[in-house]
Image (spheres, grey):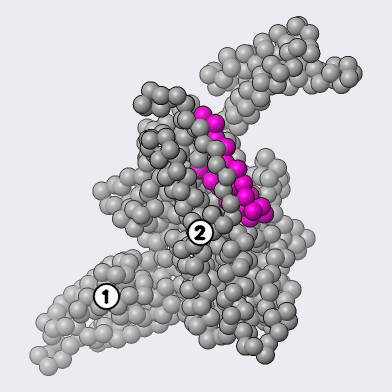
């Protein structure tokens, strides 16, 4: 039985495993080492994941879902500021839980369900590549995920049919990848991914990886840089054309993809061109089609995103403060996440490090940026290493992670009293003794909170339970209640309350903090098992349909260009084969469509041979 490590990313996801003691990234069925974290549902009741979903996103924006990680485990009132400019619709149910509308299936999905499709794709690709059954995994999460988001990620893994051995923080996983052969190192992990930003400081010594501090911003990532660029482009386009591009979902999706590509290109080039002919083909004002052609420079991009760049500075300083370290104590700054390729981000890190170094320290001999492992793959490799440790395939290493946020209870005056402070090494157990407010009090409501603020309203309520049948006390005494917090290595919390005199007690396991209850999760798991073979066949058909459609469209354009140089018979045969594919697509018959697709490939290959001989 093979164990895998999964980096479930906001923009891209990666899966890795251990072979002969060495971690390596498993390529997906398309041959790529990263899989876009995108899921699409088509009008033909097909589900596409990854590259195929991304490829059709422009023509199916309302049913193509991306950046889902930013919503997992949260409620709608917690993410309203992020809802602007999304081509798909997010609603809420009666409990304020996030639901994502899917017009193609005439239903709604939870973020966990959509995330499970991505995990299932990664797992299926691993099974195919390894030719082995895969049922267990380690999944990574941003260090600053709260209890609800952590449990929601575990739920997504369960829905995908996996046993989740452990979830570990992304910076911690990255440190495993970078620090496997290092000893006596203090490492700062700067993890700027697609949707979240984490900073962790770890001490690596004799196979012990101890997290000294972790902090970050769960609402900061590469997607936000894209959104700022998109807003800038929209503003320019709308003013020039006197239109609102937000009224055109397909056009907005094209613009979103162009902005992402521009950001990537500006990491290696000083400027890039954004050219989108026929961005709006049929304007609602009845006018001519609208186009967008614009040059974007690196300076413009950095100016647009100046606030985001500066927001990366405070968590670094806070992590050093929490760890009680100076920059001169660091041996490495490890860059994780594709967004660390942005030149302005690297420059920011350099400025933080060198501005704080003592003048007597030579910067050339001090800390420098570590790029020894692909920043897109480091987290998945670390997850695979942790899976290998749990499987017994690697020598034992001790991983000491921390809880990212403080945990406590509500006390009189709507105050949060902390019981476990943030950056406490997990697993951990802490308790405090409280007294009832009245000698006649027979019941205590215990509200469990997570956060750093002083008052209840400013923190997140993650659980609530009662301790009943407390014996009445004398008028001058109060009942004493011991409240114990036990948090495991996954960040899952158990809270116990016990009345000291009678030993009467009760407890709550804070694990069902995602938007799905146990019944819903089990139903989804059962459905996944029940329809596993059917879904597999549907996926094969969906992938074939997309490949055949794209190939037919490309070949039609190509032979039109070649028409003057090829004989009429070959031209008509290929046109006929293309039309046959289009005739077979609605039938949803895999065998028939595969036959017509193979025939077109055969004819094209024959034509290429003829043209090669002719030349």
Image height check: is 117 above or below 106? Answer: below
Q: Is residue 219 left or right of residue 434?
A: right
- Residue at horizontal 26 percent and vertical 48 percent from the top: 94
Instruction: Please tell me how many numbered marks the rendered image carries.
Output: 2
Image height check: is 54 above or below 477? Answer: above
Q: Is residue 542 visible?
A: yes
- Residue at horizontal 46 percent and vertical 33 percent from the top: 250
Q: Is residue 357 left or right of residue 93?
A: right
Q: Say if the magenta span includes residue 261.
A: yes
Spot occupied by residue 209 in the image (x, y as percentages of width and height) = 62, 76
> Which numbered tag is attached to residue 303?
2
- Residue at horizontal 31 percent and vertical 47 percent from the top: 92
Q: Indicate the quadrant containing the N terminus: top left, top right, bottom left or bottom right.
A: bottom right
- Residue at horizontal 36 percent and vertical 44 percent from the top: 90
Category of crowding for the residue at label 1, using alpha-carbon neighbours closer than 10 angstroms: few (below 14), some (14–19), many (at least 20) = some
Residue 174 in which image quadrant:
bottom right
**Which stretch appears magenta?**
256-278
Residue projecting furthest to the front = 240
Residue projecting furthest to the top = 569
93, 524: nearer the viewer = 93
Q: Is residue 175 visible?
A: no
Q: Which residue is mark 1?
A: 455
């Amino acid at each position: 039985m093979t164990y895998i490590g999964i980096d479930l990313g906001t923009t891209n996801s990666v899966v890795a495993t251990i072979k002969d003691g060495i971690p390596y990234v498993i390529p997906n069925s398309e041959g790529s080492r990263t899989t876009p974290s995108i899921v699409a549902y088509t009008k033909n009741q097909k589900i596409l994941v990854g590259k195929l979903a991304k490829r059709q996103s422009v023509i199916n924006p309302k049913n193509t879902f991306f950046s889902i990680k930013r919503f997992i485990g949260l409620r709608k009132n917690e993410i309203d500021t992020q809802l602007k400019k999304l081509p798909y619709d997010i609603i809420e149910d009666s409990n304020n839980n996030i639901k994502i509308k899917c017009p193609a299936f005439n239903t709604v999905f939870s973020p966990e369900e959509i995330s499970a499709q991505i995990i299932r794709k990664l797992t299926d690709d691993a099974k195919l590549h390894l030719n082995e059954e895969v049922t267990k995994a380690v999944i990574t999460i941003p260090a600053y995920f709260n209890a609800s988001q952590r449990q929601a990620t575990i739920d997504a893994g369960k829905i995908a049919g996996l046993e989740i051995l452990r979830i570990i923080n992304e910076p911690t996983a990255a440190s495993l990848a970078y620090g496997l052969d290092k000893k006596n190192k203090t490492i700062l992990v700067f993890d700027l991914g697609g949707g979240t930003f984490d900073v962790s400081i770890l001490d690596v010594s004799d196979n012990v990886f101890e997290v000294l501090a972790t902090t970050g911003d769960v609402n900061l990532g590469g997607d936000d840089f894209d959104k700022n660029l998109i807003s800038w482009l929209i503003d320019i386009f709308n003013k020039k054309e006197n239109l609102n591009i937000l009224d055109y979902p397909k056009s907005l999706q094209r613009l979103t993809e162009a902005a992402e590509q521009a950001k990537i290109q500006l990491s290696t080039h000083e400027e890039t061109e954004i050219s989108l002919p026929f961005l709006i083909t049929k304007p609602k004002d009845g006018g001519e089609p609208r186009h967008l052609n614009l040059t974007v420079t690196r300076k413009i991009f950095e100016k647009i995103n100046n606030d985001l760049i500066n927001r990366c500075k405070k968590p670094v300083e806070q992590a050093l403060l929490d760890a009680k370290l100076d920059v001169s104590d660091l041996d490495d700054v490890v860059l994780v996440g594709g967004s660390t390729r942005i030149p302005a981000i690297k420059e920011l890190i350099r400025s933080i490090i060198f501005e704080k170094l003592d003048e007597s320290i030579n910067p050339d001999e001090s800390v420098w940026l570590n790029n020894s492992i692909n920043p897109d793959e480091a987290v998945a490799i670390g997850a695979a290493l942790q899976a290998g440790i749990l499987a017994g395939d690697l020598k034992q290493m001790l991983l000491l992670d921390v809880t990212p946020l403080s945990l406590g209870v509500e006390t009189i005056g709507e105050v949060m009293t902390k019981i476990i402070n943030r950056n406490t090494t997990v697993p951990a157990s802490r308790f405090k003794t409280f007294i009832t407010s009245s000698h006649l009090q027979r019941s205590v409501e215990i509200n469990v909170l997570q956060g750093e603020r002083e008052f209840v309203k400013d923190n997140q309520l993650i659980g609530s339970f009662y301790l009943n049948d407390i014996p009445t006390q004398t008028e001058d005494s109060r009942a004493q209640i011991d409240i114990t917090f036990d948090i495991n290595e996954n960040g899952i919390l158990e809270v116990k309350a016990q009345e000291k005199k009678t030993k009467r007690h009760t407890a709550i396991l804070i694990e069902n903090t995602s938007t799905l209850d146990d019944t819903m999760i089990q139903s989804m798991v059962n459905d996944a098992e029940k329809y596993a073979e059917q879904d597999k066949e549907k996926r094969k058909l969906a992938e074939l349909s997309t490949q055949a459609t794209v190939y037919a469209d490309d070949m039609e354009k190509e032979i039109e260009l070649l028409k003057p140089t090829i004989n009429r018979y070959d031209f008509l045969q290929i046109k006929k084969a293309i039309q046959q594919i289009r005739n077979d697509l609605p039938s949803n018959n895999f065998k028939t469509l595969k036959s017509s697709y193979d025939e077109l490939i055969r004819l094209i290959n024959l034509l290429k041979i003829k043209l090669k001989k002719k030349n």
